[in-house]
Image (cartoon, rainbow, N blue to C red):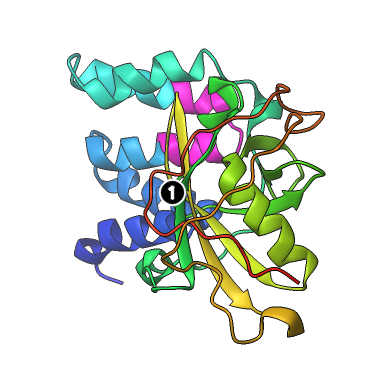
Amino acid sequence: MTDSLLPATAVAAALSQNWKEALRINLSILKEIPDDVEALSRLAYAYTKTGQLTLAKKTYEKILDIDQYNQIAQKNIKKLATIKKKDVIQHIPTNMSPMIFLEEPGKTKIAECIHIAPTQLLSTLSAGQEVVLKPKNHCVEIRSLTNVYLAALPDDLSFKMNKLIAAGNTYQVVVKSVDKNSLKVLIRELTRGKRFATQPSFINTTSYIPFSRGVGQDAPEGPDMTPTGEDGDAEAPEE
C-alpha cells in the first residue's frame, strides 16, 4: 500500500470501528511524518475508543505542542477529563457502511431519545455504533451491547415498539448522532412476526395511548409526552 493511500485507509478503519487497525495505520503514518496533525487526531480518537485514555491525552497534548490553537485537541482534552476507563463502551467491531443510515419508508425511524445517560457515558458513543432495544413494562430502553443503560425511547414510540417486539418483530438500532445533551438513534425493521407480517412498523398515521406510570427502574418515573421529532408515529394495529 502506498503512503498516499494510508490516510484514507485509516479513515475507513475508523468508520468501520476497527480500532486496532486504526491504531496500526496511524502509527505507521506517524513513523514517517511525526507531526502529521490529522494522523495524531485519528490516533488519539482510536486510543479513546480502546480505553487507552492516558495515551489519548498525551497524543492530544502533542497536537497542541504543534498547533496550540487546535480546537479538536482542546475540546477532547476537556472531554477526557470527564471519562473513566470503565465508562468506555466496548462492543464488537462491525464493518459499518454509510448505507446503514439509509432511511426506508415504513421500515426505518429516527428517534430523539429521552432520559439520557450522563455526559461522560454519552461521550464514549459514536455515530454508527450499534445499540439494542430493551423492552420494559412501560418503556423501551436503549442499551449498549454490554447492557449499559443509555436512554429511553419517547413514550409514544415505546408504546408502539413494545407491541411490535412482543409480537415477534426484530430491529437493528444504531446511533444516528450524539452530543453531551442528546442522543438520536435510527431504528430499522429487520423481520416481522406473524401478527404483523403485512404491516410496516412505521406508517403515516398518529395514535397514542399515554402511560399512567414511569419508564422503569433505570429512568425517572412519570409519563413523558416528548415527541420523537419525526413524522409518521403510529400505533400498531390492535389485536
Q: Nearer the viewer, residue 222 or 116?
A: 222
SS type, badge 1: loop
Q: Quadrant of residue 137?
A: top right
| Picture coordinates of residue 218, whole percent (x, y) | 77, 28
Amino acid beneath label 1: Ala
Q: Nearer the viewer, residue 133 or 167?
A: 167
Q: Is residue 190 above or below residue 55?
A: below
User: Is residue 210 left or right of 109 when viewed as pictured?
Assistant: right
Q: Is residue 126 above or below residue 191?
A: above
Q: Residue at x 63, y 38 (%)?
A: 152
Circle 1 is placed at which residue position?
A: 127
Q: Nearer the viewer, residue 24 or 123?
A: 123
Res. 146 visible in picture: yes
Q: Quadrant of residue 166?
A: bottom right
User: Is residue 59 left or right of 215 when viewed as pictured?
Assistant: left
User: Disc count in the image?
Assistant: 1
Q: Residue at x 52, y 60 (%)?
A: 234
Q: Quadrant of residue 13?
A: bottom left
| Residue 1, magenta (yes or no) | no
Q: Which residues are magenta?
A: 44-57
| Picture coordinates of residue 189, whole percent (x, y) | 57, 71
Q: Nearer the viewer, residue 178 or 56?
A: 178
| Picture coordinates of residue 136, whole percent (x, y) | 80, 45
Q: Is residue 178 above or below residue 59?
A: below
Is the residue marked by circle 1 packed among few (<14), some (14-19), or many (20+) residues within 10 Å?
some
